[in-house]
Image (spheres, helix red, strand yellow):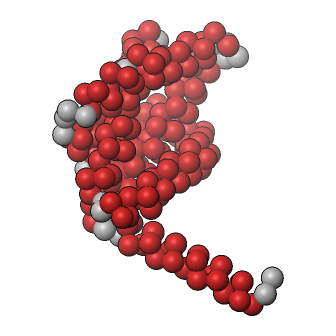
């Protein structure tokens, strides 16, 4: 590769970094981005805690795990299409905050049913939590154009999508370590706190 080509690639890379900085360090977008990281981590922690709970109750049971996945996935098909319609009509910032608070409260109720040794109410809570997530995600995507100028919207969306992918990859690893260290019961408490932190 010629020196000129190398310099052009470096200049292009520098321009991309500058554009990312221009968007990321704007107060409103940075707050949204930070809330996204915390919320994404909360989702991963919640999923790992639920898997740990199911495994502790029914070691090696494929049916028990399938039941859990059913209540996680069903909101995507039932609530997802409806949520998108209402998000267009509501205040997106309020929807995100309320969704996080609702999820935080719901997570804090799970240990109660663990103590009572009742699994079915936990499945209902899981359904409600991931239903709230169906309102949170489109609200976040629709809110970005409200706080980012149109000429920087592509960069902002790229940052949001990249953050989500990295959160999925590293979030599961970190969440798995935390659950192994503190157990699923404390995992739910930490998860609940993370949702309230995201709302703030």
Q: Nearer the viewer, residue 21 or 99?
A: 21
Image coordinates for residue 159, horizontal then vertical, percent? 47, 58
For the point 56% across and 52% down, which residue is it? Answer: 166
Horizontal arrangement in the rendering, residue 83 relative to residue 154 (left or right): left
Horizontal arrangement in the rendering, residue 107 relative to residue 12 (left or right): left
Horizontal arrangement in the rendering, residue 104 relative to residue 185 (left or right): left
Q: Nearer the viewer, residue 122 or 81?
A: 81
Q: Is residue 127 visible?
A: no
Residue 54 position (above or below residue 5): above
For the point 31% across and 68% down, which residue is it? Answer: 26
Query: How many marks do you count on the picture?
Result: 0
Image coordinates for residue 189, horizontal then vertical, percent? 39, 36
Q: Nearer the viewer, residue 176 or 82?
A: 82
Horizontal arrangement in the rendering, residue 60 relative to residue 175 (left or right): right
For the point 29% across and 27% down, which residue is it? Answer: 85
Image coordinates for residue 89, horizontal then vertical, percent? 20, 32
Q: Nearer the viewer, residue 59 or 17?
A: 17
Which quadrant of the view contains residue 42? Answer: top left
Q: Is residue 83 visible?
A: yes
Identify the image quadrant of the N terminus: bottom right
In the image as oriented, which residue stretches furthest toward the bottom?
A: 3
In the image as oriented, which residue stretches furthest toward the right?
A: 1
Image coordinates for residue 167, horizontal then vertical, percent? 53, 49
Residue 58 position (above or below residue 98): above
For the point 67% across and 17% down, which residue is it? Answer: 59
Which quadrant of the view contains residue 29? Answer: bottom left
């Amino acid at each position: 590769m010629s020196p000129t080509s190398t310099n052009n690639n470096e200049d292009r890379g520098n321009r991309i970094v500058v554009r990312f900085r221009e968007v990321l360090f704007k107060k409103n977008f940075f707050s949204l981005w930070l809330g996204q990281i915390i919320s994404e981590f909360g989702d991963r922690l919640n999923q790992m805690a639920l898997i740990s709970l199911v495994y502790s109750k029914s070691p090696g049971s494929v049916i028990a795990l399938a039941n859990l996945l059913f209540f996680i996935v069903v909101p995507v098909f039932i609530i997802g299409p409806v949520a998108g319609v209402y998000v267009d009509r509501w205040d997106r910032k309020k929807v995100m905050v309320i969704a996080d608070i609702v999820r935080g409260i719901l997570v804090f109720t799970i240990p109660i049913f663990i103590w009572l040794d009742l699994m079915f109410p936990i499945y209902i809570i899981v359904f409600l939590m991931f239903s709230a997530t169906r309102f949170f995600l489109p609200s976040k995507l629709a809110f970005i154009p409200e706080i980012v100028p149109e000429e920087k919207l592509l960069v902002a969306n790229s940052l949001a999508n990249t953050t989500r992918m990295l959160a999925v990859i590293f979030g599961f690893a970190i969440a798995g370590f935390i659950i192994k260290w503190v157990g699923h019961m404390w995992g739910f408490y930490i998860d609940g706190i993370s949702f309230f932190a995201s709302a703030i």
